[in-house]
Image: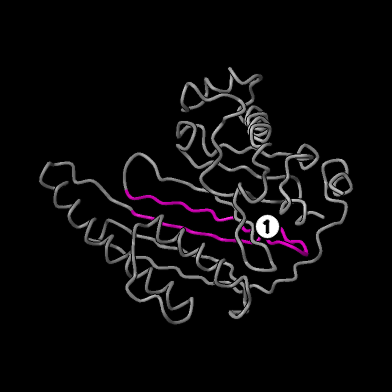
Amino acid sequence: MLGLAFAAGQCLWAAEPDTVALTAVTQHETAIVKKKHSLEFTVNVQLPADEDSRLYTPVRSWAMGLLFGQTGLTLDDTTGTDSEVAERMAKAYVKRGKAEITDLAKMSRRDGTDSRFNYAFDLSVQRVYETRRFITFVAETYNYAGGAHGVQTRVYATFVKADGHRLTWDDIILPKRKAKFCGLVTDGLQDFFGVKGFAALKERLLVDGKVSRTSFPLPKNGPGLLEDGLRVQYEAYEIAPYAAGQPLSVVPYSAMRGVWSKMGVSIWR
C-alpha cells in the first residue's frame, strides 16, 4: 500500500482546493516613547473560522503559545473574541515596552550615550498547504528588543483534520526507522549549507561532537507536510550559529518509503 502512495516523490492525488474556511485576526499597535524611541506590535494570524470545529482550539492554542512564548508575556484574561485577546496582548506588550525603554533611556543618559531604543514584534500565521486529511500552517516571527539584531523564527505545524491533532515526529516516524530518517535530514542539511559529507556539515554546526549522521537531533518543533516534501525546520541557534539563519532540510516523500509510521501512511494514503 505504501508504495502506491508516492510517485516521483509526490503524492499521487493532488491537494484539493482549500476546504477549511479561515478568518484573519489582525492587530497593529505603535507607540513613541520620549519622542525618540519606538515600539511596534503586529499580529496577522489565520484561524479556522468555525469555532466549533475540531481544528479551531488546537490551532488557536498553538498560535497563542507562540505569541506568549516569543514575547514572554502572559494574560490573566484570555476570554472574549480572538481580536479582543490580540488587542489586550498588544496593549500589554506596549505597556511593558514603554517601562523598559524608559528605564533604558535613563541609564543611557546617565552614562552619556543617549542611545535610541526601538522594540518590534511581528507574528504571522498562514496556511501553506491543505489536503483532505490535514492542513499545514507556517508561523513566522520577528522579535527585536534591543541588541545587535532581532531574532527571526519560522515554525511549521501540521494538524489532522479528523481530530485536530498536531503531528509530532513520533507520530509519523517508525521508531526502528528513526536512524534512517535522521540520515535523510542530514542529507537535506548538506544541501542547505552547500557542503558534501556529514563531516563537512558538522563543521558548520553547533552540535555535540558525538552526534552521528543517524543520531542527529530533530527540531523541537514538529514536522511540516507540504506539497514538495517534509519540512524539517530548525530555529536560529538550535543547531547552528545565528549567521547560519534557520537551517531547513526538505525530505522528499519518495525517500520516506519504509520510514512512515502507520499514522503517516494513513495521512498520505
Q: Is residue 7 left or right of residue 151?
A: right
Element class at badge 1: strand
Q: Residues within 10 Å of mark 1 (few under 14, many from 20)?
A: some
Q: Residue 208, how many percent across, how many down?
A: 46, 26
Say if 267 sits above or below 258 in the image.
below
User: For the point 69% across and 67% down, which residue is it?
Assistant: 161
Foreground: 62 or 44? 62
- At label 1, which amino acid type do we have? Val
Say if 38 sits above or below 185 in the image.
below
Q: Residue 259, how many percent across, how many down?
A: 73, 40
Say if 69 sits above or below 18 in the image.
above
**First to last magenta residue range:** 119-145
Foreground: 234 or 218? 218
Q: Is residue 143 left or right of residue 14?
A: left
Q: Residue 229, how many percent across, how many down?
A: 73, 44
Q: Which residue is mark 1?
A: 128
